Image (spheres, rainbow, N blue to C red):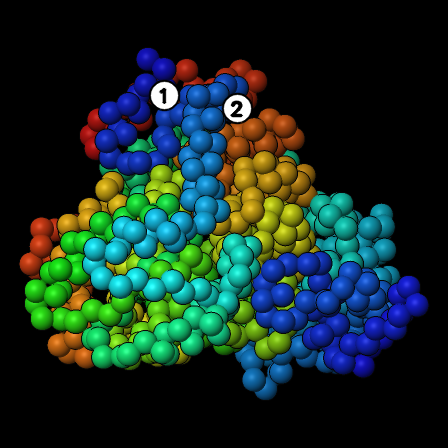
Amino acid sequence: MYAHAVGGTRFTFPDLRRLMACATPHRSGDVLAGLAARSMAERIAAQMALADLPLTTFLDEALVPYEADEVTRLIIDTHDRAAFAPVAALTVGGFRDWLLSDEADQAALAALSPGLTPEMVAAVSKICRIQDLILIAAKRRVTTRFRDTIGLPGRLSSRLQPNHPTDDARGILASIVDGLLLGCGDAVIGINPASDSPQRVHDLLSMLDDLRQRLDVPTQSCVLTHVTTAIDLMAGGTPVDLVFQSIGGTEATNTSFGFGLSILREAREAALSLKRGTVGTDVMYFETGQGSALSADAHHGCDQQTIEARAYAVARAFSPLLVNTVVGFIGPEYLYNGKEIIRAGLEDHFCAKLLGVPMGCDVCYTNHAEADQDDMDVLMTSLAAAGLTFIMGVPGADDVMLGYQSTSFHDVLALRQMLNLKPAPEFGAWLDRVGLTDATGRIRPLDMPERFQRLLAAA
Amino acid sequence: MAVADRFTGLRAYTSARIGLGRSGPGIATADHLAFRAAHALARDAVNTALDVSVMEAALAPLGPVLRVESRACDQATHLTRPDLGRRLSDRSAALLSAEAPGEEIAVLVAGGLSALATASHAAPLLTILVPELRRSGRSIGPVCVAPRGRVALGDEVGALLGARLVLVLIGERPGLTSPDSLGAYLTAGPRLGRTDADRNCVSNIRPEGMGLPEAARRIGWLIRQAMTRGISGVSLKDESDRLLAASPAAPSIADTGN
């Protein structure tokens, strides 16, 4: 049992799960699950009790039982005690102070990552203010490679997301060209297909591969289909660059998504055997988001942010090129408004980076959430300042297939200009080569270059 | 030629906001405000309460209408507590229990996430569908109207009315370009605990999506099949396309936010 007094009242928490849940800043999903603190005093009491907790507690006490969950087994079995040593004597509160200190630089944080568990980083995030989440994450760059180099300091990449309600090839091509002209697509050109049929996915992947080769653009493509579909397609010779899968932080969540860790292993090996990367071999693309475990009734009584951080342990075991928290997509019953979405996006990025995961963010909201584009501006700017790996580029921020609002190609340009960020170096060199940049390096095409005109005319 | 002008012809292939005007790195004023206008319409669709009196009047020619309510007592609760939106209030449950059962088909009309969609399309759709079902010998109970409710509210409505099938017409989560999209969900053997896998869905019902006559034909086909075979959901495939002109596939239930 854990306890702390605030304002003359002593609050008690029967176990670590309850303590973590009560220490979590307010969000509707924890209320829906019946796990949230019942008052602001109870929440800060939980945060104070959590701050006094030794970090080693999380190695001794599993929030999700080891025997019942392969994600817990992955976390415990791969924990690196030697890497953990520099912070092993600290409490959660002491860990926050250390993370803010000058001692915790890029090298120290990178060396520490294998020694951290998701529960440790989730715990410290709960007692961090937003400024901490930005400041600390900005010190931890995670670099990955396939056909270009993602995540270097001073860089902000983008996923070009050219979705179409019926997967019309010409409509998708038009959105891709629009995005490339605005300097987007260096993280991936990634389509959410309207239909998951293997034939449809094959056709889209073939089209993307043909386009990439014709334009000679150093990026990778992905159609976000189920991992088992990708395995079958690779066996049949389809050009698969990156294998996609939505992942969660418990075995039961992943079972509801139709996969287990062994299937991810099989898919990664199949993708590696294709040897399609030119500058690196990071072949996986994962998406996550707070609330998915509760939605699948697979949260084991844990708060949604802690379970989300556990998904990053799944991700890092497979050396992904990209991981993306689709923060506001799930709806107001999990993240009610702009304030909750902003906090969740920054927590997810912070936790992922401390664990060594190349985190991007789909800065987004649905129309039944109490949020708008102003909230997204605050979140995307904060994330870019925190060293975010990539954001989405959607035409006009309006995804006409999935029916939600994300970030636009123009948002990518604005963030790069505001914070003096550049795309991945290989992709940046391509933008220069095809004449899309002006003398100062800004994306300012006055007209569409000839090769793009030919491409569209042929479609 | 400016870049944006190169996209003029391509807009025929996609409703995506391609080739927007650019001011420096930003979106030019006209396109920027057009986006805000679309969001404003979608937000108003979510936040507007369904006018039950108007619905009653529009549905009256089809037979008796019953007002019911879910346990979500206001719009904020409706949005954050889907569990409460799936259950009838005690008063409404008692009201339906007192109704004489015996009709084969129960109908629930609910505001869902777009009262605009429900107010615009539910009554005209039922005006086509209900007489057609009656002509084919099916009996239809009172139409229930709930200002706030989720799809699964129909399970309790259908069970209390003793129906063999429940049809729920509900406003779907609005997209920027579709604030008035109505969804139709039908469930055979309605009772508490049914899941999405037990339902068939006809989605995106609105003039710019699936038109009302086509939606009525499709729903009618599914209802007749479900009644004849006693099943709905994943085991009942929508093969009405074989009888109808080809049309785009309906999105899955998971996409509609209900």
Classed neighbour count for the residue bearing mark 2: other residues with Cα under 10 Å, few (<14), some (14–19), many (≥20): many
The spot of residue B101 in percent (x, y) is 27, 79
Q: Are marks 2 and 1 in contact (CB under 8 Å)?
A: no
Q: Give the CA separation, mark 2 to mark 1.
A: 14 Å
Query: Quadrant location of residue A454?
Result: top left
Q: Residue furthest bottom?
A: A67
Viewer can see residue A288? no
Left or right of A25 in this view: A157: left
A333 or B64: nearer the eye? Answer: B64
Q: Which residue is mark 2?
A: B25
Q: What amino acid type is highlighted by mark number 1? A: Ala
Q: Earlier in the sequence, mark 2 or mark 1?
A: 1
Mark 1 chain: B
Q: Residue furthest right?
A: A8
Q: Residue at x 8, y 59 (%)?
A: B242
Query: Quadrant location of residue B155?
Result: bottom left
Helix, strand or loop status at disc 1 = helix
Report the disc number at residue B79: none
Query: Quadrant location of residue A399?
Result: top left
B224 or A406: nearer the eye? Answer: B224
Q: Which residue is mark 1?
A: B4
Q: What amino acid type is highlighted by mark number 2? A: Pro
The spot of residue B120 in percent (x, y) is 30, 45
Left or right of A274 in this view: A142: right
Viewer can see residue A327? yes
The spot of residue A418 in percent (x, y) is 63, 28
Q: Residue at x 16, y 71 (%)?
A: B139
